[in-house]
Image (tube, rainbow, N blue to C red):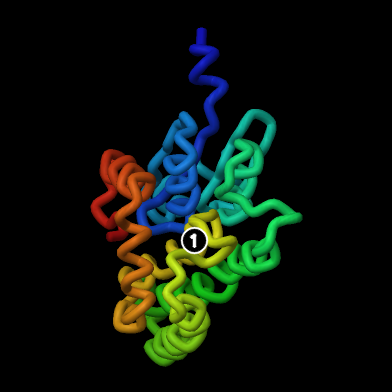
């Protein structure tokens, strides 16, 4: 018979360097028990049985009782609000609008161009390489990340409501991915200092340790 305590824990399906790292980091920041399933990348090809759990074949997949979620920044916000944590920003707080905007900015504006770049560069199948597309989308990322550098130029430690929030996890993952995707040269000055602060957090270190324990050699640094 399954252990009822184990059965009650949320489960996160994760691949090294994938968007699911946001969710793993969020779980560790909140100190919430969870089960982690580390998948080979890309799971839709490397682990086709995963399609039975997530027909999209995408990462992450997050299960929490009857809740099924596949969008990394939504999962982070869900976890914070469900826990009543100040890692989310309340609707009546100053900075709520910034928080909402930055959650999406980290994914739609900073992560998406990098994944297109990776698709036609590092992860392109033989014969499908498109170096011009790879470079175009690297340029898109490097242009757009200047908005975050500008926000940090006044010496702010974090991006919304004067404290560390899930918006920092959303943006932070995109900056960490920049090293993996070949855009590390865009991270200088306040961006580099900001990223160092994020990586120094105990929650980040625990998430990295959990990822490495899953046996994924390409975990993001």
In the rendered image, is residue 10 in sight?
A: yes
Q: Residue furthest top?
A: 1
Q: Is 77 positioned to the left or the right of 149 in the image? A: right
User: Where is residue 9 shown, x and y percent of the image?
Assistant: 53, 26
Which residue is rendered at x = 42% and y = 92% of the image?
132
Which residue is rendered at x = 24% and y = 52% of the image?
217
Which residue is rendered at x = 38% and y = 75% of the image?
191
Provide the secondary structure element on which disc 1 rests. Answer: helix
User: Where is residue 195 shown, x and y percent of the image?
Assistant: 35, 66
User: Where is residue 200 shown, x and y percent of the image?
Assistant: 30, 55
Which residue is rendered at x = 44% and y = 81% of the image?
153
Res 184 quadrant in image: bottom left
Q: Residue furthest left?
A: 217
Residue 12 vs 200, above or below: the answer is above
Q: Which residue in the structure is indicated by mark 1?
A: 168
User: Where is residue 87 shown, x and y percent of the image?
Assistant: 55, 49
In the rendered image, is residue 141 in sight?
A: no
The C terminus lies in quadrant: bottom left
> What crowding class fits label 1: few (fewer than 14 Cα within 10 Å), some (14-19), or many (20 or more)?
many
Q: Is 82 positioned to the left or the right of 129 in the image? A: right
Q: Is 216 positioned to the left or the right of 36 in the image? A: left
Residue 160 vs 121, above or below: the answer is above
Q: Is 125 positioned to the left or the right of 101 in the image? A: left
């Amino acid at each position: 018979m399954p252990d009822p305590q184990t059965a009650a824990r949320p489960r996160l399906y994760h691949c090294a360097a994938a968007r699911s790292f946001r969710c793993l980091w969020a779980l560790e920041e909140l100190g919430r028990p969870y089960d982690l399933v580390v998948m080979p990348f890309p799971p839709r090809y490397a682990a086709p049985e995963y399609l039975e759990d997530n027909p999209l074949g995408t990462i992450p997949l997050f299960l929490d009782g009857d809740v099924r979620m596949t969008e990394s920044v939504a999962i982070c916000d869900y976890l914070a609000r469900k826990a009543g944590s100040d890692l989310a920003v309340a609707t009546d707080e100053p900075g709520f609008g910034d928080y909402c905007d930055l959650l999406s900015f980290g994914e739609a504006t900073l992560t998406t161009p990098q994944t297109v770049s990776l698709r036609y560069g590092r992860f392109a199948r033989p014969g499908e390489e498109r170096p011009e597309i790879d470079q175009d989308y690297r340029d898109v990322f490097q242009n757009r990340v200047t908005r975050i550098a500008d926000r940090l130029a006044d010496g702010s430690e974090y991006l919304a409501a004067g404290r560390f929030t899930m918006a920092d996890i959303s943006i932070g993952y995109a900056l960490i991915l920049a090293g993996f995707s070949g855009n590390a040269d865009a991270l200088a000055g306040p961006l580099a200092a900001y990223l160092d602060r994020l990586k120094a957090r105990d929650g980040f270190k625990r998430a990295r340790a959990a990822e490495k324990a899953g046996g994924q050699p390409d975990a993001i640094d």
